[in-house]
């Protein structure tokens, strides 16, 4: 019989900061452009801030936002 024991890893409900997905919001809308997220405090940072924080931008939001601003 083995005497090696393992500890259960810490499980967290929050996503690590580096894995955060940033979404786009139009104007004062509380719902993201892709419709899957609600605006949270501090959610409105610019693209360069998003990149500096190593966040990933929501691809669906990005495409819909570009289409909305270009008028496609």
Image (cartoon, rainbow, N blue to C red):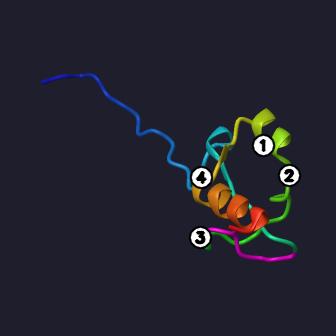
Which comes before the other along the chain, label 1 or label 3? 3
The residue carrying mark 4 is: 59
Q: Position of residue 15 (x, y in %)?
A: 60, 49
Q: Nearer the viewer, mark 4 or mark 1?
A: 4
Task: State the residue at coordinates (56%, 56%).
Answer: 13
* Residue contact between numbered discs 3 and 4, judged by CB atoms under 8 Å: no
Location of the C terminus (image quadrant): bottom right
- Measured in 3D between alpha carbons, the distance from the residue under mark 2 to the one under mark 1, in whole angstroms, is 7 Å
- Measured in 3D between alpha carbons, the distance from the residue under mark 4 to the one under mark 1, in whole angstroms, is 13 Å
* Residue contact between numbered discs 1 and 3, judged by CB atoms under 8 Å: no
The residue carrying mark 1 is: 50
- Measured in 3D between alpha carbons, the distance from the residue under mark 2 to the one under mark 4, in whole angstroms, is 16 Å
Q: Position of residue 54 (x, y in %)?
A: 71, 35
Q: Which residues are magenta?
A: 28-34
Q: Nearer the viewer, mark 3 or mark 4?
A: 4
Which comes before the other along the chain, label 2 or label 1? 2
Which comes before the other along the chain, label 2 or label 4? 2
Location of the N terminus (image quadrant): top left
Q: Nearer the viewer, mark 2 or mark 4?
A: 4
Which comes before the other along the chain, label 2 or label 3? 3
Which comes before the other along the chain, label 3 or label 4? 3
């Amino acid at each position: 019989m083995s005497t090696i024991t393992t500890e259960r890893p810490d499980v967290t409900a929050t996503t690590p900061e580096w894995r955060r997905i940033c979404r786009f919001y139009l104007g004062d809308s509380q719902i993201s452009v892709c419709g899957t997220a609600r605006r949270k405090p501090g959610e409105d940072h610019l693209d360069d801030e998003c990149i500096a924080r190593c966040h990933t931008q929501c691809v669906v939001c990005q495409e819909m936002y570009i289409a909305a601003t270009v008028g496609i």
